[in-house]
Image (cartoon, rainbow, N blue to C red):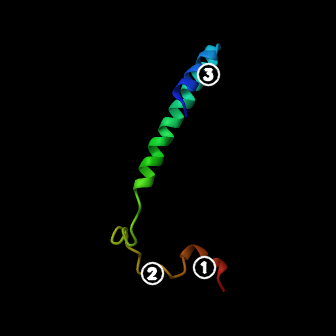
Amino acid sequence: MNEQLIISKLKQIKSENLKQELLLFLDYLLAKQFIDEKAAKRIPKFGCAKGTFKMADDFDEPLEDFKDYMP
């Protein structure tokens, strides 16, 4: 998009409240652009979490809290 067009439309805004709102929106867009660029670069590999957690040996065993509800 043409920067001159953006500047000309900006000059048409008279209200200071609208200018402040525009600044907040521009900050939002810049932050979103940074997050999108950062997220696009990171692609996790299969198995990258191996060894970061350990399952308990009794993981599949019934829980004590649910004894009343089991036959």
Which x, y percent locates residue 34?
44, 42
Mark 2 to mark 1 CA distance (whole Å):
16 Å
Which residue does the numbered mark 1 point to in the structure image?
A: 67
The spot of residue 57 in percent (x, y) is 41, 81
Closer to us: 40 or 17: 40
Circles 1 and 3, Cβ within 8 Å, touching? The answer is no
Q: Residues within 10 Å of mark 2 (few under 14, many from 20)?
A: few
Local packing at callout 1 (Cα closer than 10 Å; few below 14, some 14-19, many 20+) is few
Secondary element type, mark 2: loop
On the image, the x and y values in percent for residue 44 come to: 40, 64
For the residue labelled by badge 3, is the local secondary structure a helix, a strand or a loop?
helix
- Secondary element at tag 1: helix
Judge whether 56 appears above or below 39 on screen. Answer: below
Front residue (pair 67, 14): 14
Neighbourhood count class around disc 3 (C-alpha, 10 Å): few under 14, some 14–19, many 20 upward:
few
- Residues under labels 1 and 3: Cα distance? 69 Å
Provide the residue designation for mark 3.
9
Q: Which mark is residue 58?
A: 2
